[in-house]
Amino acid sequence: MIKMSNRRIRKHHSAIGKKAKQRLFRFVAPIIVAITILSLSATQAPSAQKFPINTKPTADELFAQSGTSSVTALASGNQITLNGRTLSGAWLQQRGTDGQVKTHLSDGAFRQFIGVDFLSSNSAVRQPVEWFSSNQPLVLATRLLKGYRYLDITNFAQTAGWQLQANGNILAIAIPQAQVKAIRQSQQPSGVSNPPFQSARIVLDLDRPAPWQLSQGLPITIPVVPGTATRQSTTPPNREWVVIIEGTADPALIQQYAPPTSLPNLSPQPAQPTPDPLIRQLEVVNNRTIISLSVPFGMTPQIITLSDPNRLVIDLRADALVQRNINWAEGLRWRQQFVNLGTERFPVVWLDINPRQAGLTLRPIGTQSNTQTGTAPLIQMAQQSSAVAAINAGYFNRNNTLPLGAIRRDGQWLSGPILNRGAIAWNDSGQFYLGRLTLQETLNAPNNQRLPILFLNSGYVQSGIARYTPTWGNSYTPLTDNEILVVVQKDRVTNQLPGGKAGETAVPIPQDGYLLTLRANATNTASQLPIGATVSITSSTNSADFNRYPHIMGAGPLLVQNNQIVLDAQSEKFSNAFSTQKAIRSGICTTASGSLMIAAVHNRAGGLGPTLAEHAQLMKNIGCVNALNLDGGSSTSLYLGGQLLDRSPNTAARVHNGIGIFLK
């Protein structure tokens, strides 16, 4: 990837502006600039993502948490309207030292709904941005409050001609309507049939700056016409991406990009594959121009904005991710870049965290505090817990939404480890331990009997004894047929119950004890646990190092330990197919300097994601000395301040748990 400084990028933009004034439009050399992977949360959007709306904090609460209670807070909320369209976005207003009202918008909403590009920065209180900018980027003041970073958009909005009005929980933003005057396209041939082109460019000429959004859609399926033969393609299908501009398009453009109305070719001969047009459709809905793109596999849109004249430039390219290094908050840096493995290039987005930063803590997070059942989007999970950042973490059963691995918070096991898989443990002093984890629990029964407890608060089901405590929830519903449930209260067996058919009858878990469930052959041990019997439990971890840490998150496999790749997926009972599959991956690691990094690795340039072996090497290449693979694929999600950094929210699956970063 070509690396450019901000100054170099601005000079490059200026050169493009001069060439665009020529009548002959031709392909311009690719520009390495910022991409914003977005999802539109408005109900009208084709692939809309509904973001949760949290209980509104009062303005006084916000400023009290930031240590700036002396500043007069006028209003705050978590909804905005953009030209009448309601969206989820945190904002607040205060009176500045000059007596004027200052409006602050969360940076996630600013990027998602306005299309503002964030440039690399070393200052945690200043954020340079570009949005239809001239040679110099704008620099906005920032402040961190209750899980969000707010940008002072007062002067930005005034310069752009916006009208801002607070009304209760809602900040109304009225933006002058833009017009899409023309659309130009070009392609740079690849020289081979697959991919159909090396890169492509679409330029939208606008009469004024306009907010824009980008969202990823589904793979495009070509309808089969009855009676015709088709040739099977070995290339994955194109994917729809949708670009939305807050403005209307010229009627001639709408007609030009209207869907074809001609009848399909009914010839019985095999249909010759023809490349899809880049622009599938253009329509204007509620004064917004919606452009549906057909993007070949292995390529992604990269969008920049230019001024004098105003243009929105959409580049389709295999290496769309742009290098970014932003000091987002004290102790938390947002980074992204391509990382090379031989001839392969992988886009890696990660957060570099100083665990010793004052006020910074890490905790496992979940969907609900009173049960271990359930899943939710990571965005919702992070916002409900007021985490400033988060990553998806452990495995779970997507059918019954139960955990499949270790989760310990504040010394309590929410879910026990399974299969000697990799885990990370930590404390509030910024110390970490990564290794393979087993929990050894023994039930001490009458007559000096020692019965092994194989699983604790787990959705993983095998023959033997499992234990469920109140941290599992208020009740336990049998996961297999014909279990025997032993009720223990205050270290004494108080009841035995037949479990019956799996999934039918919920049995209360005593708050002063736990349930033992005897599965399959272990039902024979019921006679050794008569009502009234006194029992006790001994518990320890292997490795014993895990015993020293109050917080643990399990996943696996373990990738790197003491700066050596120690990947052994088979020993952690992962299948060979899982190991060799090329897939999107999540990871967590520690570095030689003592920092923590949480990372998302997506599809390589022009191909699929990394194998586990590639993932281990990638984690080493970004500086990890101890690293753990987390749940990946559609679960992979990296959250920061109200936004997903690595993907469109509508493409991220619901997850059971995550690791949250908190800043006070």
Image: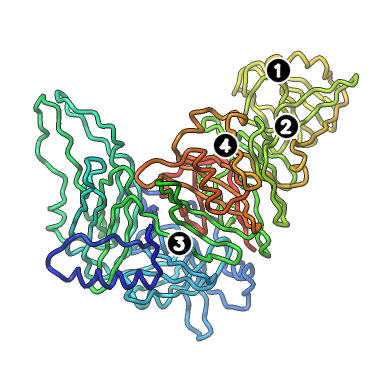
Q: Earlier in the sequence, mark 1 or mark 2?
A: 1
Amino acid bearing label 2: Ile
| CA gap, disc 1 and disc 4 | 30 Å
* Residue where numbered disc 4 is placed: 395
Nearest to viewer (mark 4 / mark 2): 4
Residue 324 is labelled as 3
Judged by depth in the image, the label closer to the viewer, 1 or 3, is 3
At label 3, the amino acid type is Arg
Residue 448 in the figure: left or right of residue 425: right
What amino acid is labelled 4 in the image?
Answer: Tyr
In the picture as drawn, the residue positioned furthest to the front comes out as: 342
Q: Amino acid at mark 1?
A: Pro
| Residue with the mark numbered 2 | 509
**Residue 505, position in %: x, y?**
63, 24
Instruction: Kindly identify the residue that appears in the image at 13 percent across and 43 percent down.
Output: 260
Residue picked out by circle 1: 498
Marks 3 and 2, Cα distance to the nearest angstrom?
Answer: 49 Å
Name above or below for residue 27 compared with residue 438: below
User: How dense is the environment of label 4, judged by Cα within 10 Å: few (below 14), some, or many (20 and up)?
Assistant: many
1 and 2 marks in contact (CB < 8 Å)? no
Distance from the alpha carbon under mark 1 to that under mark 2: 15 Å
Disc 4 from disc 3: Cα separation: 30 Å
Using a 10 Å C-alpha cutoff, classify the residue at mark 1 as few (fewer than 14 neighbours), some (14 to 19) or many (20 or more).
Answer: some
